[in-house]
Amino acid sequence: MDNPLPYLGTIGLQLWSVRDQMEKDPELTLKTIKDLGYYQVEGGDTRILKDIKSVCDDLDLKIHSSFINWNTITGGWKYTPDDTPFEFAEVLDQAGEAGLSHLVFGYLPPEERTSADDWKRLADQLNEAGSEAKTNGLQLTYHNHNFEWDPIEDTTGFNILMDRMDGGLVPFELDFFWAQIAGQDARETMTTVKDRLELLHLKQLRPGTPVITRLDDVPDNAYEELPDGDIPIKELIHYGKELGVKYCMVEQDGNYEGSSLQSAGKSLDFLMS
């Protein structure tokens, strides 16, 4: 494409991509992310923001969005017994202290998606939480995986969310990889959610990977650096700009070429080229 690629001046990295390095040395990892050329990072949990904000501020590395603990919305603490329960109000406080603009609901355990009614309940819970977030100057978003397209009672979780979730209160952070591996065309999915699309996860799928709608069935080698797959990442970024997307985040869950930071650098070099 002849047009300059948008979002390069705000391009972010989801910290899950470099979780191994963040565990070893978060300060050095954040500095390396900045040196690679990223402008922002997306947190994996609002509870850790206080630990990295001062470092990010010193580096001028922005934090506009973060994933949240999903149980603060669903109440499913019994499915994560090692976790200490806390309230969604605390998530809002943590986000406010970090100066976030967006929160991301990013997972639902299998035990909480066994029926269409489960998905309807989730949509209602998200609408309520999205309203609370709006009241506090924050935008809640929904990050998809592949299981939203797993058939359930002659429909899918995705269809139920589209029907029942208020797109103004809870738009999507659409992840290309997860939509594509579930048998969906990423661009067509963007079109489907176009009036409720807020953020994009730029993630590449290994060519030849079969359609998979269950998380446990995804092979380790399904993930790729951005230039090494068939999803037309740059084209979709341009389309995202047309649809009013706010921010784009690079993410890679595994199968790194070299190391997680080297992979993050390779993906960013592809976008900058």
Image (cartoon, grey):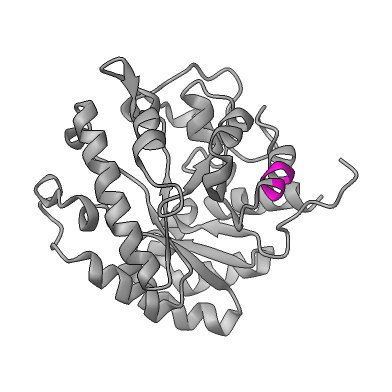
> Residue 94's image quarter?
bottom left
Q: Is residue 116 visible?
A: yes
- Is 235 drawn above or below residue 42 in the view shown? above
* Residue 181: % across, % down: 49, 25
Q: Residue at x 48, y 33 (%)?
A: 178
Task: Report the front residue among 197 and 269.
Answer: 197
Magenta residue check for 18:
no
Q: Residue at x 62, y 69 (%)?
A: 34
* Residue 199: % across, % down: 55, 52
Q: Residue at x 42, y 26 (%)?
A: 219
In the image: residue 8, left or right of residue 183: right
Boundaries of the magenta span: 238-242
In the image: residue 179, left or right of residue 150: right
Q: Is residue 148 visible?
A: no
> Residue 225's image quarter?
top right
* Residue 5: % across, % down: 79, 51
* Residue 28: % across, % down: 52, 72
Q: Residue furthest right?
A: 2
Quadrant occupied by the N terminus: top right
Q: Main secondary structure of the magenta part?
A: helix
